[in-house]
Image (spheres, rainbow, N blue to C red):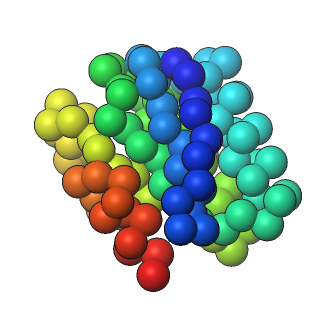
Amino acid sequence: MTITTTERDGVTVLALDGDVMGGPDGTALHNRLSDLRTEGIQQVVVDLTGVRLMNSSGLGMLIGGLTTMKNGGGDLRLAGASSRLQTLFTMTRLDKVFRQFENVDEAVASFS
C-alpha cells in the first residue's frame, strides 16, 4: 500500500493505493496521522478509491486513524470506497462510525 498526501481547500487528503492489510501499512498510516496532528492539521479525508482489498487489520488501521484525529480535536472522513468496501463497512457496522462520501470533493466540502 502507498499513501499519497495532498491538500484541498485546507483539508489534507491521504490517498491509499493497493491492499490495506494492516502491519507495516498500519504503522505508516498511524505515523502519518500523528505527524499531521502535530502540525496542527485537524481535517483529514482518506481516499479509498485506489484500495482493492481490505481485511480486519485494515479496518483496524482506519479505526485507529479516526481515534488519533478525534483525540487531537479533529476528524477523519472516508471517500471513494468501492461497493466491496461498502459491504465490508456495513457488515462490520463501521458505516455508523465513519462519515463516508462518494468522492473526495464531497468529503472535503463536508468540512465547510
Q: Residue furthest bottom?
A: 112
- The residue at 76%/38% (across/down) is 31
Horizontal relation, residue 68 to residue 82: left or right: right
Q: Residue at x 42, y 18 (%)?
A: 18
Number of numbered labels in the structure image: 0
- Regarding residue 42, the answer to whether it shows in the image is yes
**Residue 107: image location, x then y, percent:** 37, 63
96 and 8: which one is in front? 8
Q: Position of residue 39 (x, y in %)?
A: 83, 59
Please determine whether, in this image, residue 30 is positioned above or below residue 28: below
Q: Is residue 36 left or right of residue 60?
A: right
Q: Quadrant location of residue 3?
A: top right
Instruction: Give residue 88's quadrant in the image.
Output: top left
Compared to residue 51, the image places residue 5 above or below, namely below
Report x, y in % for residue 57.
Answer: 49, 27
Can you name the residue that lies furthest to the right here?
38
- Residue 77 image point, x, y percent: 44, 59
**Quadrant in which the C terminus is drawn:** bottom left
Residue 97, visible in the rendered structure? no
Residue occupying image coordinates x 61% and y 41%: 5
Q: Residue at x 35, y 60 (%)?
A: 105
